[in-house]
Amino acid sequence: MQKGFSENFLWGGAVAAHQVEGAWDVAGKGPSTADVMTAGANGVARKITKEVVPGENYPNHEAIDFYHHYKEDIQLFKELGLKAFRTSINWTRIFPKGDEETPNEAGLQFYDDLFDELLANGIEPVITLSHFEIPLHLYKEYGGFKNKRLIDFFVHYAKTVMTRYQNKVKYWMTFNEINNQADGQHALHTWTNSAMLFEAGDNAEELTFQAGLNELIASARVVKLGHEINPDFQIGCMMAYVPAYPYSCNPEDLMAAVKVMDRRFFYSDIHARGVVPNYAKKYWEEKGYHIELSPEEEADLAEGTVDYIGFSYYMSTAVTTLPDVKGDVITDFPGAKIVSNPYVSASDWGWQIDPVGLRYTLNTVYERYQLPLFIVENGFGAYDELVEGEVHDSYRIAYLQAHIEQMALAVNVDGVELVGYTPWGIIDLVSFGSGEMEKRYGMIYVDKDNQGNGSLKRLKKDSFAWYQKVIRTNGTEA
Ligand code: BG6
């Protein structure tokens, strides 16, 4: 078997603006959905306070202060050998409220400087337009993405930044992990994906389908527009792929797994194929949902299909209909439950570690869409111990190594077309799910704890030298 990857393979690292930048109210920036999420803990949900409430702990307000440290961080990325760096543009630096006509020049200038610094150091920026950073005003005034007005606001924002950075950024993604909200059941997901919270009496599922569809329409318009701005743009979607395996070979388990996955594929099916899948139409019909989609919007979906599929992969899960196995009930597939897979281990946060699942995902997604794939997140969140200025994170190396091996098999044995690999949280950052600093993914350690104490000093972990070698040898010595 051929080892390694193509010559121009994008080895990189990934972060998101709100998880690293801090400076949440600097230079005209407005508050975003991420700025009203408190610190949670392992197993303790973050609160969404709707306003910035004095006395609460909002970890994203300072994060790792990348806003003021990006130059020194980029020097470390360069030393690491990164060819690509994925981050997002914080929408509220550009449009503080989200519905303005004129952008905030100071916000635009910040990303000009950041992209210039990356390019000057030979690092390609890979940019997500919306990574859980929706202007808070768009929730308060319009109720979030269930309101079609947000389509225009998003398109205006995207047009502004794509025009400004047309000669600096080539790789774009529209909405981060748009399918997190798939079942509409988790407040954190509908908040971060769509800036929506529900009241008693709301049909969360119906509203989430509508919001998701509005985002897909916005995305399609942006893909079309982006290609007009610069035909060389590569514009992708961004999905969270968590494969659900049938727990047993009982045919009912297999069917339950198909239905669970359809729910999550709904978004990339539209992004990639440009039509609403029949299984969704049937479901809406059966439930009596009225999802608004005009003929003009339907045409937009068809004309704005993505160039590639960007996705995150961290773990897999399993589904069963067997009555004697304990698990979490799936609301829309009566009798089915999400259960633990006994063949894999899990992280301290219960995320099931399954490298083969990455190869499986690369295969199934490639077969489904026949589009280039880009792994824009993968990584191991763990408690690190700092001993005399060193972090020996062999567990992180083992996780990443095993996933890169499977990635190599998918490319070299299965023939999957893969653009690049940008492991998540290349530098320690605020966890999205729990708001912790101490759920660390980085190869670069940042001195800051869950209470917000620390010097913010950066240190190289053992995984730094390891990844450096992986990149230098183009994956042949992972
Ligand atoms: C993805 C997100 O869900 O996974 C990131 O795109 C997030 O924003 C990452 O940080 C890891 O999740 P967590 O909860 O461990 O930070």
Image (cartoon, rainbow, N blue to C red):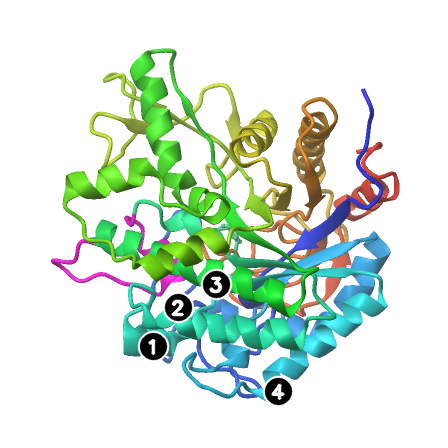
Which is closer to the viewer, label 1 or label 2?
2
Which is closer to the viewer, label 3 or label 4?
3
Q: Earlier in the sequence, mark 3 or mark 1?
A: 1
Q: Is mark 2 within 8 Å of ligand 1?
A: no
Give the class, few, some or many, for how many residues have Cα within 10 Å of label 3's Cα (few <14, many ≥20). Answer: many
Q: Secondary structure at mark 1?
A: loop
Q: For the residues labelled 1 and 4, say whether their Cβ atoms are less than 8 Å apart.
A: no
Magenta-colored stretch includes residue 156: no
Give the class, few, some or many, for how many residues have Cα within 10 Å of label 2's Cα (few <14, many ≥20). Answer: many
Q: Earlier in the sequence, mark 1 or mark 2?
A: 1
- Residue type at numbered disc 2: Ile
Q: In the picture, residue 472 is in which quadrant? A: top right
Labels in figure, total? 4
Q: Earlier in the sequence, mark 4 or mark 2?
A: 4
Which mark identifies residue 106? Answer: 4
- Residue type at numbered disc 4: Ala
* Spatial separation of the CA atoms under disc 3 and disc 1: 31 Å
- Residue type at numbered disc 3: Arg
Q: Secondary structure at mark 4?
A: helix
For label 2, the residue is: 151
Magenta-colored stretch includes residue 188: yes
For label 1, the residue is: 51
Q: For the residues labelled 3 and 2, say whether their Cβ atoms are less than 8 Å apart.
A: yes
Q: Going 73% across and 78% down the picture, which residue do you hit?
A: 113
Q: Is 162 above or below relative to 467?
A: below
Q: Earlier in the sequence, mark 1 or mark 4?
A: 1
For label 3, the residue is: 221
Q: For the residues labelled 3 and 1, say whether their Cβ atoms are less than 8 Å apart.
A: no
* Spatial separation of the CA atoms under disc 4 and disc 2: 24 Å
Boundaries of the magenta span: 184-203
